[in-house]
Amino acid sequence: MWRLRDKTASATALDFVTVGNEMAGSTADPTRGDAVDGIGFLLQMAGELVLAAGRLLSDGEHYAGSALLRQITEIEHLTWTIKENNRNAVDWLRSSHEERMKNFTPAQLRKTAKGRFLDKDYQDHCEQGGHPTVRGISLLGGRNKAIGQLFMVDLLTHSWRTWDQVAIWSRTFPRASRAVTARHRQISLRLYRWGQQDPIYKLMVERFPDK
């Protein structure tokens, strides 16, 4: 099961980067790009984060891996918000620091998330790895193998949700839709097969169903 999680994470991450590259193309000035460019860049960011986080968590560097996991949750929040039309990908891509602080911080995104993203969940991610707190001490040294694998399940779950959100959003953008469609079956089937086999994921879905 450890190998399955690791392989699923790394393959999904590489697919994210590929699709993101196809969306964004070779934009000379990212800040002048369109909505498809913006989502393409976000997907590339997610891919690099998933690849690195999966590697760190699998190798016992749980504290560092959890820090990257927090960033992946932020991308999930942002892609969901854009998919729901609460925010615009072009606005994010062209935003200044001041505009991002006003409209795109995790706290601001949760205000319009209709309860989908809980403050406590994000707080846990921050205290486990996003910020230097006492809670992160237990993750040092990779001694707790079980927590590393729990984080791997969380990593794959956030990745799956991010992909579904991008796929839904892409339907109204032909350039994005072409890039997503080319790999949608491959990515979704891989994640589905992992979910069918992973007992931790099954238990999580039973206890916390995604309504």
Image (cartoon, grey):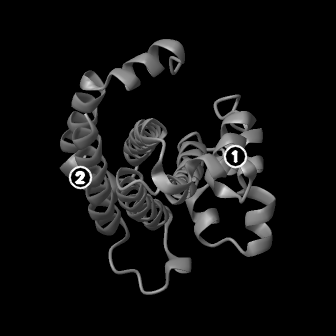
At mark 1, the secondary structure is helix
Which residue is depicted at the point 23% across and 52% down?
A: 11
Which residue is depicted at the point 75% across and 57% down?
A: 103
Task: Nearest to the eye among marks 2 and 1: give it.
Answer: 1
Query: Could you tell me the amino acid type at mark 2?
Result: Ala
User: In the picture provided, is 130 more to the left or to the right than 172?
Assistant: right
Of residue 156 and residue 114, the one placed in the foreground of this image is: 156
C-alpha gap between disc 2 and disc 1: 31 Å
Residue 181 visible in this rendered orientation of the protein: no
Sequence-wise first label, 2 or 1? 2
Which residue is depicted at the point 59% across and 45% down?
A: 77
Q: Residues within 10 Å of mark 1 (few under 14, many from 20)?
A: some
Query: Could you tell me the amino acid type at mark 1?
Result: Arg
So how many labels did they put on this image? 2
Which quadrant would the N terminus be assigned to in this image? Answer: top left
Task: Where is residue 14? Give x, y as percent.
Answer: 27, 59
Which residue is depicted at the point 32% across and 74% down?
A: 25
Q: Residue lying farthest top?
A: 206
Q: Residues within 10 Å of mark 2 (few under 14, many from 20)?
A: some
Task: Where is residue 97? Give x, y as percent.
Answer: 74, 74
User: In the picture provided, is 46 more to the left or to the right than 191?
Assistant: right
Task: Give the labeled residue for mark 1.
Answer: 135
Q: Is residue 25 above or below residue 1?
A: below
Task: Give the labeled residue for mark 2.
Answer: 11
